[in-house]
Amino acid sequence: MTDTRDTPFADGAAYIDGAFMPVRDARIPITDWGYRRSDVTYDVVGVWNGSFFRLDDHIARFRRSMQALRLDPVEDDARIGAILNTCVRLSGLRNAYVAMDCLRGRPLPGQRFHPASCRNYIAAFAIPWVWVISPEVQARGAHLIIASPLRIPDRSVDPTVKNFHWGDLTQGLFEAGDRGADTCVLLDADGHVTEGAGFNVFAVIAGAVVTPDRGALEGITRASVAELCGDLGLEYCERPVTAQELRGAEEIFLSTTAGGIMPVSRIDDIVLSDDRPGPVSMRLRDLFWAKRAQGWHATPVDYGDAAP
């Protein structure tokens, strides 16, 4: 494998609309609707120890999101997988945060000023691994709040389609910082838990692992949690979860591509599990990384020297 530390790809590699480039040189036109209207969908897949985790699942979800938003780029799924592999190969990274976006362009001159008139295109990049919650914070358990902004209604923006409509989550993150917490989770208008800033939320209630069945992304790592619960003989349930239930849970943990399974030790002013990660959370977290090390759902990156 080529050492990229002194190359233009040292900070990562990108692909935009048919061309590869160093991530520092990646640009999108400011007139495109992907930028001006957040008319874009995306997905993120992780590379750990030189292998993608659940790559096919991420690309399949990406395709479903594109179809839901009527985005139709020229690249098929196999080509998207090859693009992601090339971004990682060019970067030389063994642990990488790998994003894929599909953006709507802008209507060509003389065409109707309407999204149907816009060409769609793919952008992707690989950069060094990103932790949504750092390992140091995970070790003591994240401090979580239920923030005051409500999640965008799912009748307005479908939460199962990954999107950049993060205004509510961004407000929640600032509120978490103001309150001395690490991150936040949002409720819907009926007082049910939805999701957090880039992660799904789980509560351990009467020994069962429970996660919201509405208002949240159908996370790939969330699906992995369900599999792990089966391995450990834990009851797993997707159902409505109230704020009161979350605050009264025996344990809370979070899941995301960029961090795996992340324990919580506080919610609002409530201390959980003697202010440390709970036993169920840690069993799941340890098994997650142990199985990852064994090649669970892994697709090795091809670091060969073939041209893009």
Image (spheres, rainbow, N blue to C red):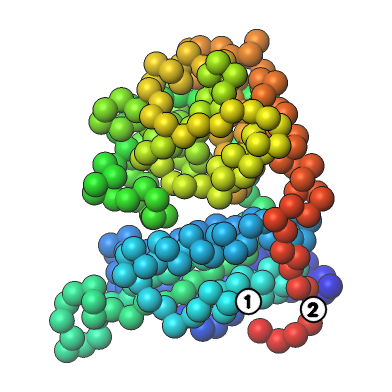
Q: Nearer the viewer, residue 61 or 113?
A: 61
Tell me residue 244's x, y (percent): 39, 16
Q: Is 156 situated above or below 11?
A: above
Residue 111's mark?
none
Residue at 66% over, 72% down: 85
Q: Quadrant of the N terminus?
A: bottom right
Residue 170 placement, left or right of 303: left
Q: Is 80 situated above or below 241?
A: below
- Amino acid type assigned to the residue bearing label 2 in the image: Gly
Residue 53 placement, left or right of 169: right
- Note whether residue 30 is visible: no
Residue 211 placement, left or right of 128: left
Residue at 64% over, 34% down: 229
Q: Nearer the viewer, residue 263 or 268?
A: 263
Q: Is 214 situated above or below 190?
A: below
Please give the residue where the numbered disc 1 appears in the rendered image: 82
Q: In the rendered structure, which disc, 1 or 2, sits on the residue that comes first in sequence? A: 1
Tell me residue 42's x, y (percent): 46, 61
- What kind of element bears circle 1? helix
Residue at 47% over, 47% down: 218
Please give the residue where the numbered disc 2 appears in the rendered image: 304
Q: Quadrant of residue 232?
A: top right
Tell me residue 18's x, y (percent): 51, 83
